[in-house]
Amino acid sequence: KNAGKNQLATFDPEMRAARLEHSRLTTGLRHAIAQQELTLNYQPVVDLNSGAITAVEALLRWNPTGGKPVRPDVFIPIAEETGLIIPIGLWVLEQACADARRWHEQYGISVTVNVSGRQLRDENFSDAVLTILRRHDLPEQALVLEITESMMLATTTAETQRLISVLQALRDHGVRIALDDFGTGYSSLAYLRTLPVDILKIDRSFTTALTEADRRQQTRAFTKAIVELSASLDLRTVVEGVETDDQAGMLQQMGCPLAQGYLFSPPAPAARIDDLLQSAPWRKAAA
Ligand code: C2E
Ligand code: MG
Ligand code: MG
Ligand code: MG
């Protein structure tokens, strides 16, 4: 039976191709930092009432030399498996803090960085975060770390407890924690009670379904309930993936304060964020 399985795996051309691609990407990713193939894009988080940019989310891009860009959904899991997410994650934090410094100084906006479970499990993580903040002279309050329920879940209770205390220690220093992709996990409510979070990001799937014919009534009820629950827990609520005026209007009516999505801006290079911030009408008001 085993031999049969192995044979199948070895000779299945599709699986062979997938494995080759995987090892090609792993090799490439190993040199991505040194070859300067990594860049960050930033997506504005917008106040639904005033239109002001309150934060930007750093989103990693990989453009292998002489090849096509690889999507984060493809290379982030590989970086996690291989442990390369540790150096890559540090590079992301370093670059995001360097870029965010002037944005924070001039416009008071914060920067949001996605963090993997593997990074949080690294015992040097919180020290590294605080050191990077100091190196770039960025106040702790200007940084938000995005985590997901699933990365807290995939461990023992004791390990989850340890991760919670790492987050809590960072929070005690003023770094804020956002729970990303909320509503896609299965124990959301139970986790909300125990996780030290400041910001709740409602997953894009809710936004999309708000205006879909078949599920919209149910989705609107759910979304409104999450927005209200979040507010009553004193969390800041951000809704992800807003693409249309209809969606933005509906969410604003539900009392959702903040949003992200192509309607406002796609993820863009730092220079484009500079332009956006400079041309924004609220600049005069803030000055
Ligand atoms: P995420 O953190 O939930 O980021 C939101 C994703 O939604 C981004 O995809 C963004 O480009 C996309 N998006 C934003 N607005 C819209 C919209 O209106 N419509 C649609 N259809 N999509 C929208 P992206 O950049 O491909 O990143 C995918 C995921 O990769 C991220 O999901 C995050 O989990 C992960 N990721 C990205 N950068 C990093 C990083 O530096 N470190 C780690 N650990 N993970 C990262
Ligand atoms: Mg995110
Ligand atoms: Mg998300
Ligand atoms: Mg996501």
Image (spheres, grey):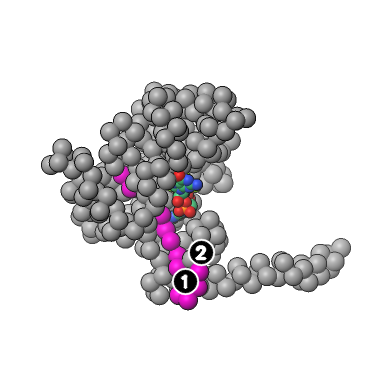
Please indicate, yes or no, whether residue 125 appears anywhere in the rendered image.
no
Q: How dense is the environment of label 1, judged by Cα within 10 Å: few (below 14), some, or many (20 and up)?
A: some
Residue 67, percent across and down? 50, 73
Q: Is residue 217 above or below residue 277?
A: above
Say left or right for 48 vs 150: left
Report helix, strand or loop for mark 2.
loop
The quarter of the rendered structure image containing the N terminus is bottom right
> Real-space Cα distance between discs 1 and 2?
8 Å
Whether the residues at callouts 1 and 2 have beta carbons within 8 Å, the answer is yes
Q: Amino acid at mark 1?
A: Pro
Residue 49, percent across and down? 31, 31
Q: Is residue 182 above or below residue 234?
A: below
Residue 138, percent across and down? 23, 52
Q: Residue at x 56, y 28 (%)?
A: 216
Q: Amino acid at mark 2?
A: Val
Q: Which contiguous range is marked in magenta?
A: 55-68
Report helix, strand or loop for mark 1.
loop
Query: In this view of the protein, which residue sits in the foreground, 173 or 104?
Result: 104
Q: Residue at x 74, y 70 (%)?
A: 13
The quarter of the rendered structure image containing the C terminus is top left
Q: How dense is the environment of label 2, judged by Cα within 10 Å: few (below 14), some, or many (20 and up)?
A: some
Quarter of the image where one finds residue 174: top left
Tell me: is circle 1 under 8 Å from ligand 1.
no
> Outermost residue, front direction?
245
Q: Residue at x 48, y 66 (%)?
A: 69
N-terminal of the pair, mark 1 or mark 2, is 1
Say left or right for 79 vs 46: right
Residue 128, percent across and down? 33, 57
The residue beneath circle 2 is 70
* Marker disc for residue 64: 1
Query: In this view of the protein, which residue sits in the foreground, 19 or 124?
Result: 19
Q: Is residue 247 above or below residue 58?
A: above
